[in-house]
Image (cartoon, rainbow, N blue to C red):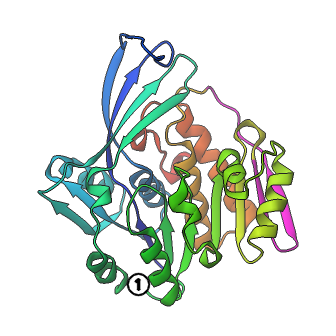
Amino acid sequence: MKILNFGSLNIDYVYKVDHFVKKGETLSSEALHVYSGGKGLNQSVALGRAGAEVYHAGKIGKDGSFLLEVLREAGVHTDFIRVTEMERSGNAIIQNDAQGDNCILLYGGANLAITREEVDETLSGFFAGDYCVLQNEINELHYIVEKAHERGMVIVLNPSPMDQKITALPLQLIDWFILNEVEAAQLTERQASDGELLLAELMRKFPEAHIVLTLGEAGALYGYREERFCQEIYRTEVVDTTAAGDTYTGYLLAALLAGETVQRAMALAARAAAITVSRRGAAPAIPRREEL
């Protein structure tokens, strides 16, 4: 089985600040670092470094050619990444504060210029049982979900960033939801802060889907039909949380495709995410399998 990650590719501009800039405030940055990023790219890097056979599909501008090298160095196939001269690559302006937290401003760029013809051409190389991984930083998500389902692919959705594009999707076709508590509350239209209640509501709403709900320091919950369990975090010094969730997603799926149980896969994912948050940057912070 192969994994197709149809996702975003960004150039990240990371500003080191004491605190997040406020309305009307001018704030000097202690440092600026330029990294490869985008939820799609980060997840593909995590999948590749975890040992999975992963193909990335998406679109970049001519300014993003170095993103291809980042993926290839991680062992990711880049055959389905198109380069356009009509748009700049997607980018993110990231503030990283003294506590290691982030706030992010996204510009979609080439990520939002994917055509249905490109979707069809890409999906023609994948078949029943292959995985299709999606996030919400590209266009044509609705079409991709429908066409991947028609081919019998296992569809994994990380509904981030959460907005009306997600609720408009045919969510009954999703096989795996991997999401955090904020996204879960928005998706269920509940204000519950209790992870167990959110998980129960997600399972009620999507009874045939596997649910992985990440809860930050409280760990992660899994639910599928009658099966439920919790995975604790591995504690570490937090430096930068940018790619923590993407690392978790990539390592979780790579372990599942390698034949691990869900519980073992979640433990490996938690360990990988703990290493990621102890380092700066997005893709550069994601560990290789041997580091776990």
The residue sitting at the left extreme is 85
User: 279 or 8, which is in the foreground?
Assistant: 8
Judged from the image, the secondary structure of the residue bearing numbered disc 1 is loop
Whole-percent x, y for residue 274 in the image: 61, 39
Q: Is residue 184 left or right of residue 10?
A: right
Please name the residue that numbered disc 1 is placed on.
126
Q: Residue at x 51, y 76 (%)?
A: 131
User: 73 or 132, which is in the foreground?
Assistant: 132
Q: Is residue 225 magenta?
A: yes
Q: Residue at x 54, y 70 (%)?
A: 169
Whole-percent x, y for residue 7 in the image: 40, 61
Q: Is residue 122 above or below residue 269?
A: below
Q: Residue at x 38, y 63 (%)?
A: 139
User: 76 or 222, which is in the foreground?
Assistant: 222
* Extent of the magenta region: 220-237
User: 50 or 266, which is in the foreground?
Assistant: 266
Structural crowding at the residue carrying mark 1, measured as other residues with C-alpha within 10 Å and reported as few (<14), some (14–19) or many (≥20): some
Q: Is residue 197 magenta?
A: no
Q: Is residue 53 above or below residue 11?
A: below
Amino acid residing under circle 1: Phe
